[in-house]
Amino acid sequence: MTEILEEARRRGFLGPGPVQDHIDHAAGMAAAIGPPPGPFLDLGTGSGIPGLVLALAWPESTGVLLDGKVRRTGVLARALTDLGLADRIQVLTARAEAAAHDPAHRAHYALVVARGFGPPAATAECASALLHVGGRLAVSEPPDSDPTTRWPEAGIAELGLTPPELRRSEGVTVALLTLTHPPRLHIPRGANHPTKRPLW
């Protein structure tokens, strides 16, 4: 895993800080989320963090690593083979807004995870359409952030999501939001709209 992420770092796919810190953060997310879910999707996976770590932590789960950049997903596809994960984890090259309107992915996942995908409103808008009812969105939260500001109740309710439950493990804080009903059919809006014109 370390060698794979070092290669991702050389290619500019992984942010600053020691590689082991990124692995530890993803492991903390897994611990905070709890028992292995059904199918999961890593939203904007980039270098494969946290998706690769979650896949190793949850050997019975299937999953999708979603990213819009072919350069990244090509590297990830090779990483899945190297880690022996290719039989149950797939890489999807697509924008989140498009994947969420694909019948193969819409309302399909028990868990959508995000670690730096984008602002809360954009993350929630894209994720809500990928979750099935009862599924959960798990987002890595910045230290000392205010959940009422990041996840206003009126905004997330429009998407069918509950107010977040904050869980902490190994120095990592995760906001867990559960989908209680499907979002409207036009959600998410077209490419870049969730980020450029956020719902809150």
Image (cartoon, rainbow, N blue to C red):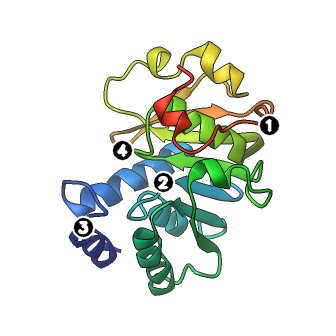
10 Å neighbourhood of mark 4: few (<14), some, or many (≥20)? few
Q: Earlier in the sequence, mark 3 or mark 1?
A: 3
Residue at mark 4 to residue at mark 3: CA–CA distance? 24 Å
Q: Earlier in the sequence, mark 4 or mark 3?
A: 3
Q: Earlier in the sequence, mark 4 or mark 1?
A: 4
Residue at mark 2 to residue at mark 4: CA–CA distance? 23 Å
* Residue type indicated by callout 4: Glu
Residue 9: give its label.
3
- Residue at image position (35%, 51%) is 25
Horizontal side of 156 relative to 13 (left or right) equals right
10 Å neighbourhood of mark 3: few (<14), some, or many (≥20)? some
Front label number (4 vs 1):
1
- At mark 4, the secondary structure is loop
Check the picture and name the quadrant holding the N terminus: bottom left
Residue at mark 3 to residue at mark 2: CA–CA distance? 16 Å
Q: Which residue is mark 4?
A: 170
Q: Earlier in the sequence, mark 2 or mark 4?
A: 2
The answer to whether residue 4 is above or below residue 190 is below
Q: Which residue is mark 1?
A: 185
* Residue type indicated by callout 1: Leu
Q: Tell me if I can see residue 175 in this picture.
A: no
Q: Earlier in the sequence, mark 3 or mark 2?
A: 3
Q: Tell me if I can see residue 186 in this picture.
A: yes
Q: Earlier in the sequence, mark 1 or mark 2?
A: 2
* Residue type indicated by callout 2: Gly
Residue at mark 3 to residue at mark 1: CA–CA distance? 38 Å
Horizontal side of 53 relative to 186 (left or right) equals left
Horizontal side of 3 relative to 41 (left or right) equals left
Q: Which residue is mark 2?
A: 44
Contact (Cβ within 8 Å) of mark 4 with mark 1: no
* Residue type indicated by callout 3: Arg
The answer to whether residue 56 is above or below residue 106 is below
